[in-house]
Image (tube, helix red, strand yellow):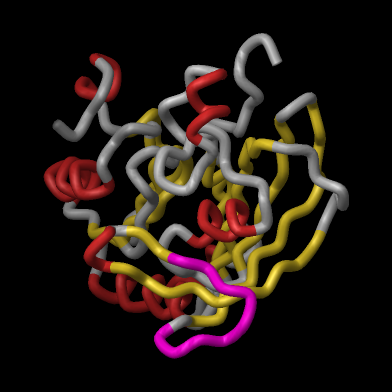
Amino acid sequence: MYFTTPKEEARPFYGVVYEDENIFVADKYAGVNAEALACALFERCGALPVHRLDRNTSGVTAFAKTQAAEEELLSAFRQRRAEKLYGAVCFHPFAKRAAVLTAYLQKDAAAARVRVFSSPRKGAEKIVTEYYGAENRGEFARVKVRLHSGRTHQIRAHLAFIGHPVAGDEKYGDEALNKKYRLHRHILVAERLSFSCTGALSYLNGRAFVSRFSAAFPEGV
């Protein structure tokens, strides 16, 4: 099953963040498979995905409605001209309010996960993850995250590697704390997306697409 609640089954995204003749930006529900959302938007307006969010990550995700827009947006993501800002609730208080982290990430396709290392290793790609605005609350902490590289499961794996797994993450997280707080879905939100585009999409420069969702502490915390 793609959807996990009646609301998600009825509609794979919360609403339209932005739409014009070139692009469509949707606000994805957590629990919705990226492929299901792509199918729904292709049927709706012929939109094609140019990046993806993990199933349990909510927030803004962009689609192209023309071939030219697809090529430009894909180029923006490849060339790091797309800025993605996330909100995350993690376990364990942060000692520093902000830091830029560098590590090396290696995919394990057979296990459908990644591994992170502190030094270069054959087959591993360099990753850079920035967090800031750390707000500690008991066993939890909330941070904003800016990606300076875009690799599979980068935020979840990198934060877990430094001892701050995303709360509710069942792949890289703290099983005991997830169980304690009855969390079964990671608290990670793609809160803001912006582009530096060229040519026909240059009118998007300076525009930020903001999610209606935000990373919130669990109730009672």
Q: Position of residue 120 (x, y in %)?
A: 57, 86
Q: Viewer-proximal residue, 93 or 5?
A: 93
Q: Which secondary structure dominates the residues rendered in magenta?
A: loop
x, y (%) of residue 46? 17, 54
Q: Quadrant of residue 14?
A: top left
Residue 46 against residue 138 in the figure, above or below: below
Q: Residue 208, can we see it?
A: no
Q: Is residue 159 magenta?
A: no
Residue at 29% x, 17% y is 7
Question: Quarter of the image containing the C terminus?
Answer: top right
Write down the quadrant of residue 114 in the picture. bottom left
Q: Nearest the camera: 112 or 100? A: 112
Residue drawn at x 14%, y 31% is 1
Residue 177 in percent (x, y) is at: 57, 28
Residue 71 in view? yes
Q: Which contiguous range is marked in magenta?
A: 115-123
Please determine whether, in this image, residue 206 is positioned above or below residue 36: below
Q: Is residue 199 left or right of residue 4?
A: right
Q: Quadrant of residue 215?
A: top right
Q: Residue at x 57, y 41 (%)?
A: 166
Residue 156: x, y in percent? Answer: 52, 52
- Side (left or right) of 96 relative to 92: right
Q: In the rendered view, would you say 195 is above or below 168?
A: below
